[in-house]
Image: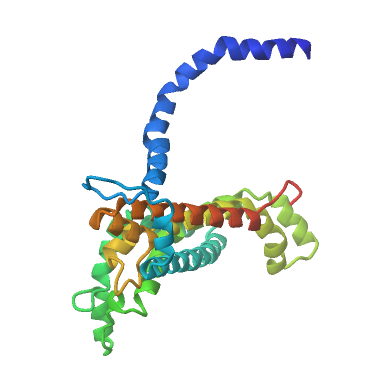
Amino acid sequence: MTSLARKVPAALGGRGPAGWLFMAPSLLILGTFVLFPIGRSLWYSLHNWTVGAAEQPWAGLDNYTRLFGDAQFQRALANTLIITVASTAVLVVVGLGLALALQSENVVSRVVRSVFFFPTVISLTTVGMVWRFLLDPDIGLVGGVTRALGLDPVNWLQSTALALPTVIFVNVWKNAGFVMIVLVAGLKAIPGEHYEAASLDGAGRLQTLRSITLPALRPTMLFVTFMVTVQSLQLFDLVYVMTSGGPLDHTETLVTKLYRDGFVNYETGYAAATSWVLFIVVVLVSALQLRIFRYNDAD
């Protein structure tokens, strides 16, 4: 114990400077491209900061007060939460169903898994452009099929009732393969002895799923729900390409509003306040997920 106590200060004193020297490039990059922008955005949010203005007066919390009195912000926040809750719930259910159905290692399962996973590697911008073309009531494939069936084509992206569900559907279509692949990996990590013991005890499929599979998948479920939740909260590309936040702000999200305020209206301080509200929402939702999916070694 005494020798260890002597070695620790020596290590800190003798090797500490060298360690900091090796870490310096990474710390410099982290400080320049992460910490400084974060601090600068907080500074902007406390000012009436406008690009090109001669003065940037102190505003305190006025930007935040203005946000919560802004009907467009309230709609954007509601749309963001709806997209996140609906997308996450559907993705987890659909992804789990696909993983359970396609976990076996045969040719058919591998091919079908590849088909479902393929949209995951495509950028959201490309996905949005393709689906915008497909859903076009005049020249799109969906409209053509609808007319062939003798029905009137639906303008999915210009309907105030259908635009948001359509965006949610495309978001689910894009990410279902990712959730499936991660859950398949989680299923394969469950020891087979657990299922053998359950079979010997006479447990049925539903009981095995409830008592063995779902508890063992809890860490994996936490990972996928966290990933798709953060992605949905920050959804921009898909919405911007498909609807640009319309019609009548019915698909406006916090990030599209942030972009519009900051890069179209040049209200940098107001946009920075929106970004900090989004950051707080992400932290609160993540903490809630950790609470729901928490587990210990006894599980």
- Residue furthest to the bottom: 150
143 or 203: nearer the eye? 143
Pinpoint residue 27: horizontal percent, then vertical percent. Answer: 44, 27
Q: Position of residue 5 (x, y in %)?
A: 73, 14
Question: Looking at the picture, does residue 210 appear above or below residue 7?
Answer: below
Q: Quadrant of the N terminus?
A: top right
Residue 142 at x, y percent in the picture: 28, 76
Counting labels gives: 0
Can residue 117 be seen by looking at this rendering?
no
Determine the image quadrant of residue 131: bottom left
Q: Residue at x 30, y 77 (%)?
A: 156
Nearest to the observer: residue 117 or residue 31: 31
Residue that appears at 42% across and 27% down: 26
- Of all residues shown, which one is farthest toward the left? 139
Closest to the observer, 220 or 283: 283
**Residue 208 position within the rendered picture, expressed as x and y whole percent measured from the top left:** 71, 63
Determine the residue positioned at 51% across, 62% down: 95
Can the viewer see residue 13?
yes
